[in-house]
Image (cartoon, rainbow, N blue to C red):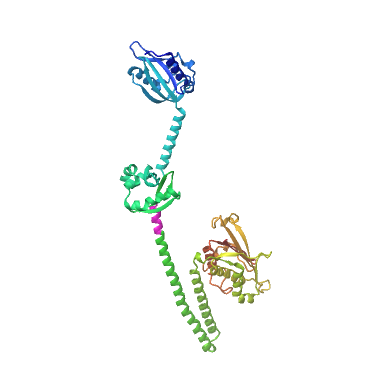
Amino acid sequence: MHRSPEAIRLALSAFDASLNSIISMTAIRSADGQVVDFLIETANPAVEQSLFLTPEQIIGTRLLKTFPGNIESGLFATYARVVDTGQPERTTQYYVDTNGLEAWFTVSAVRQGTDMVVLTFINVTDSKRAELEMKRQSDLFQTVLDHAQAAISLHVAIRDDTHRIVNFRTVMANRQARAMWGEFADTILTRTFLEVATPDQVASDFHKYVGVVETGEPNMTEFAIGDEWWLRITAKSGDGVVISNINITENKQYQQRLEATNAELKRSNENLQSFAYIASHDLQEPLRKIQAFGDIFKDRYGPLLDAEGCKMIGRMQSAAERMSSLIRNLLDYSQISAQRDRFRPFSLAKLLDDVAEDLWHSIQLTNARLLFGDAHNQPLPDLVGDRVQLRHLFQNLLANAVKFCRTDTAGKPVPPVVRVSAYPVRGDDLPADLRQELQGNRSYWAVCIADNGIGFDQKHAELVFQVFQRLHNRQQFEGTGIGLAIVKKVVEQHDGAIRVSSEEGVGTTFTVYLPM
């Protein structure tokens, strides 16, 4: 076909200006007619950006010498097939050779005449690497999803002409989601939500999904499938929702067992409290009779008894009084409970004034001095807690401080001096032995009750808080051995702690740590 000079000029201009790399090659055949190589006839300027060689460097050279990687990449076989069959081919191949060229190429090969092939190609290395990296990231993401504990699926919204959401389509599901769906997995993955959902599911879930897409606010729902419990978290993802279903059967069963145990424990505690109240009431009545009959017996028959007989009656009444006091203290101990709704702020100074009024008789008998506040007259703080319980706590501590007074070298009682002071403590500044017992992210009031009494050996510091434990006999000091056990229980009910330091003949300091 004859072409005009103008057509040839335009073709050459297009050849040189093309953004695609273009090469024409003539087949070199062996004696038996097999294509064994190609001679590069032409190359446009764009080849330099694809092959990193100028047209002048490759024109007139043999393909397999200049680009030896064509054999291994399979491109040479493609060119030979195009020349032999006349059928054009298009392919994308990875190329590497010993000359240092390594790239991905998209190549289109077309035969011209009988033995010439024209190659149009582009270097797609950057896009191919990005594609491979994207696939690697996608595979990694899918692997992470498949090994997640939750069943995760992605659903995109289907909208009508008015842009209203009318349906959802599943576009991705991890292994756990497909296992959760079971035999319905393929159906859910190939059909829309409204096609596979039951009427109950449509009524309960569809509007939730629409709401999540339109508001962006996630939704959490618990539901049961057979004997299994699931937690469903629905969150917005683009123009759709990602749904995470977490199997919480074990947690739900544990919660149900815990609730049942707590209910049983509550019933047991109520029964115990009722029993303690009834038992204390029933026990107090015969004790009152013992004391009353003892008084009558002493009044009527006291003159007829000798000293030993009167002494025995006195001991009987004293034992009955101790028993009555013990029962009252045990009842107090059993009724201490953590009722958070009764926690209120109150003035510690006012509470201590009330306690001092209750201890007025003991204070008068011992000439005790109660000092509220530190040596610098810093006021006492307000506390938060159950005022009734904390009044019981401070009354026990102050009563002990007044009661356990020491004597001087002449055997005369030393008037008790008791100081109550308080200072704030941050969680980080708590004593080392308290940091695991208390919460390090809270601050506390450390309330100190220090006296100048008889004190005790520090090795007994833990023993004093145990029920019925006494460091002194009843002949020296009255008591049931329950007071400090009550103190410790009240402190624990307030998420606090108590410590004591003491030295025989010097005094004792109790430090109560209560949350601010």
**Magenta residue check for 497:** no
Front position in the image: 455 or 110? 110
Quarter holding the N terminus is: top left
Q: What residue is rendered at 41% in x and 20% in y?
A: 119
Residue 354: image location, x then y, percent: 59, 72
Q: Can you say whether 227 is above or below 448 in the image?
A: above
Q: Main secondary structure of the magenta part?
A: helix
Q: Position of residue 111 (x, y in %)?
A: 37, 18
Question: Vertical placement of 496 versus 69: above or below?
Answer: below
Residue ID at (68%, 73%): 410
Image quarter in which the C terminus is found = bottom right
Asked if residue 255 lies in the magenta stretch, the reply is yes
- Residue farthest left in this picture: 183
Q: Could you tell me residue 316's position as x and y percent?
A: 51, 80
Residues in magenta? 248-257
Residue 279 in the image: x percent, y percent? 44, 74
Which of 228/32 is in front? Answer: 32
Vertical position of residue 186 compared to residue 387: above or below: above
Q: Nearer the viewer, residue 253 or 359?
A: 253
356 lies left or right of 104: right
Whether residue 246 can be seen here: no
